[in-house]
Image: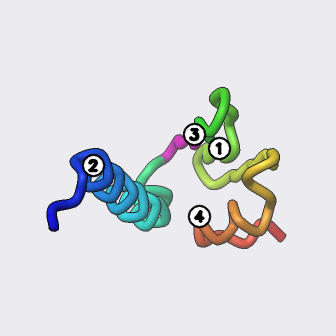
Amino acid sequence: MKLPEIIVFEKKIRSRYIKALSLVPELIKICDVMHIYDNTKLPERIFKKRKDKYSYWENHFWDKSKIERLMSIDFN
């Protein structure tokens, strides 16, 4: 039985999203300046790196612990 095209497309998007998120810690290592936004509703910045300084902003979807896990950084 063939899956509907929309389901196949959604699975591909989800797999690419997961892969992209897994690459974030590597990007942090090589970038001098980096901003990460949550586009769930309206774009909201949740993370900023400038040289060796890190900042984060929590929102309804991203709390401190989730941001730390995504970035592989401990903000304490």
Q: Where is mark 2, residue-wise?
A: 9
Tell me the CA gap for discs 3 and 2.
Answer: 28 Å
Mark 3 or mark 2, which has the lower sequence index? Answer: 2
Which corner quadrant of the image does residue 17 belong to? Answer: bottom left
- The residue that appears at 36% across and 64% down in the rendered structure is 19
Which corner quadrant of the image does residue 42 belong to? Answer: top right
Tell me the CA gap for discs 4 and 1.
Answer: 11 Å
Which corner quadrant of the image does residue 63 belong to? Answer: bottom right
Q: Which mark is residue 35?
A: 3
Mark 1 or mark 2, which has the lower sequence index? Answer: 2
Secondary structure type for disc 4: helix
Q: Which mark is residue 71?
A: 4
Tell me the quarter of the image containing the C terminus. bottom right
Mark 4 or mark 2, which has the lower sequence index? Answer: 2
- The residue that appears at 49% across and 46% down in the rendered structure is 32
Which mark is nearer the camera, 1 or 2? 2
**Image coordinates for residue 43, horizontal then vertical, percent:** 63, 29
Secondary structure type for disc 3: strand
For residue 63, side relative to residue 13 (left or right) = right
Please say if the residues under marks 3 and 2 sit with CB atoms less than 8 Å apart: no
Under mark 1, the amino acid is: Lys
Tell me the CA gap for discs 4 and 2.
Answer: 27 Å
Relative to 55, does residue 69 appear above or below in the rendering? below
